[in-house]
Image (cartoon, rainbow, N blue to C red):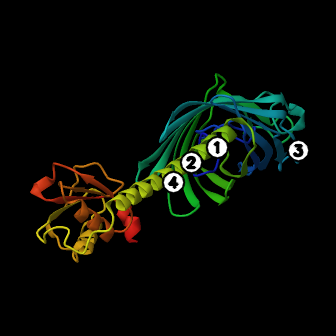
Amino acid sequence: MKRGTLLGGTALVLTTGAALASPLPPHTQVFEPGVFEAQLFTGVRNYSSDHGTTADFMPRLRAGAPGPFDLALGIPYRYDSKSKDSALRSDLHLDLSYQWLDRGATQSVIRFHTMVGANSELEGVGSGRTNLGVAVDWRRDGIYAGNDLYLRGAWEHIDQRRPDEDAGPGSYRAVGLLTLEAAMDINVEGDFTPYFGLRATVGASGNRRSEQQSLSLRPGFHWKIAEGRSLFLVSQFDMAERGGEPERAVFVTYSYNFETGWGDAAASRGVEQVTARMARLERQVDALGRSVHNLERRWLLGTPSGDPVASPETEVLLLNQSGIAELKSSVGRLLDPLEVRLVDMRQDPDAPTRDRTVIRHAHGLTDKAVEIARALPGHQLIEESNEIPDGADIVVLIGFDLETALD
């Protein structure tokens, strides 16, 4: 199994060489060895009317690594509609994730990314510089009205369009950016989940021409198509921008998760299956033991004679320790035809929940306890006791085994 999934089963990570923080929401869990994810990403960014549109494409493969790591490799491709230039952004895009916090509802991952063999500036789709970055992503499940909160802080060194240059070779620059983002995963019924984020970006460079600021709304959704398959779409609208950030953008990722028959995931699943089988076997042996014990007692006691086994004044106390309130009255109705007097029927909330019904009787009332056991469905334990509550002759300690038997 995975160590976890992001956004209800959709594992989403960076898939463009343009920006670590821009396209997708936080990535807060890693895969175990033996778990893989194949992705196909496309992102379209529309700049000002003077700078046109760029489209990014990337197929990538993500795999669990030993320890709290996973690794993703992709091949980024870009098309610039203004200059009509297109090329691979780099020979390879490398993404390494480390799970440094995993406490159930709270999880966090540190991610590093870089290009391997950055493209040439002469190809017209980048600055010719190696892109790299680091991000810390944090998630808290159910933090407000059942919704999930995501936070991100990131620094990156990326390619941006120059606002003062014509499209074509030399129209990209390498800039440093700091990004802060807060987002909410809106939990609703079904496999379609809305997503809303707010992102702020500032330049982190001594070059004033590289300074930039932006505040962006990022609405979207993720859709679990089927088991292991998902689609994520997030759009971006700048409310304020300066220095070349995209005014409008849409990013779409299709993901397919699968497991191999090796690694920690398969081993963990095998242990879970063996444990479940052993638990079922233990329950079956326990049920058989109870049946044999009950049969032995009834066999040894024999069938009661036609004479009354006890006076009609035999006092019986019902204590409901099953945790199921309705069983108390149901058992009482089953004992109505017997020659007994119910002195009390009550819940016993202070006692631990009992899984099997027990009938305890005073000395000399074994036959009457057997008669009560035969009036109830299932197989009850019969015990002799010197301490019967409330001075009764017999006490029936009701367990939740009677719920199934009465059904």
Q: Viewer-nearest of labels 4 and 2? A: 4
Mark-to-mark CA distance, 3 and 1: 48 Å
- Residue underneath mark 4: 284
| 56 relative to 332 in the view: left or right | right
- Taking the spot 27% from the left edge, 67% from the top edge, the residue there is 372
Measure the C-alpha gap from mark 4 to mark 2.
12 Å
Q: Residue at x 78, y 49 (%)?
A: 55
| Residue 376 place in picture, x, y as percent | 32, 68
- Camera sees residue 244: no
Residue 307 or residue 110, whichever sits in front: 307
Give the residue type at disc 1. Answer: Arg
Q: Disc 1, disc 4: CB below 8 Å?
A: no
User: Is 50 in front, or is 402?
Assistant: 402
Q: Earlier in the sequence, mark 3 or mark 1?
A: 3
In this orientation, which residue lies closer to the viewer: 158 or 312?
312
Q: Which residue is mark 1?
A: 269
Q: Is residue 14 left or right of residue 40?
A: left
Q: What's the CA distance linking mark 3 and mark 4?
A: 70 Å
Q: Residues within 10 Å of mark 2 (few under 14, many from 20)?
A: few
Instruction: Report the Cα–Cα distance between label 1 and label 4.
Output: 23 Å
Indicate which disc residue 85 carries. 3
Which residue is labeled 2 in the image? 276
Indicate which label's residue lies in the foreground, 1 or 2.
2
Q: Position of residue 45 (x, y in %)?
A: 72, 49
Q: Secondary structure at mark 3?
A: strand
